[in-house]
Amino acid sequence: MRIELELPDWVVEGPLYVLAGIELAAYRGINKEWKIKTERCHSCGTCCKSFNSAKPSNSFPPTTKGVCNYLKDNKCSFGFHRPFSCCISIGTSMYGECAEKYDI
């Protein structure tokens, strides 16, 4: 599928996300190349175990010792219905076990 958009100049001030429902399909960092998702999330929970334990206690998702409180039986309990903040977390593919992958 090819999509062409004419966007205003101010959009270069921040990242851009393309969602398919609530799942991130592609993104572009500030003044960077687009990255297109080639492998989908399988709710393995790898990214749920990698939070910075120094993050504010009132931020979402809530965590205990760097692990998301919604991680159940080593899987994301939200599955594909996870919150928007989890959907746009970039970099989950840097964990070797994660199925989610992006290509330029």
Image (cartoon, rainbow, N blue to C red):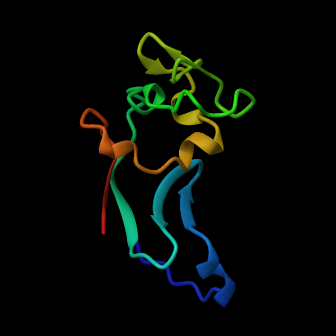
Residue 23 drawn at (x, y percent): 52, 48
Q: Is residue 77 above or below residue 1?
A: above
Residue at 37% x, 64% y is 36
Give whichever of 51, 101 is nearer the camera: 51
Image location (x, y in percent) of residue 27: 48, 64
Taking depth in this image into account, of 65 and 80 the one nearest to the observer is: 65
Residue found farthest to the left? 96
- Which quarter of the image is occupied by the N terminus? bottom left
As drawn, is 60 to the left or to the right of 20? right
74 is higher (above) or lower (below) than 20? above
Report the side of 72 relative to 56 (left or right). left
**Furthest residue in direction right, as rendered:** 58
- Relative depth, front residue between 50 and 20: 50
Give me the residue at 41% from left, 15% from top. 74
Left or right: 101 as drawn, with respect to 60: left
* Total marks in image: 0
- Residue 66, given in percent of the width and then of the height, sits at 51, 24
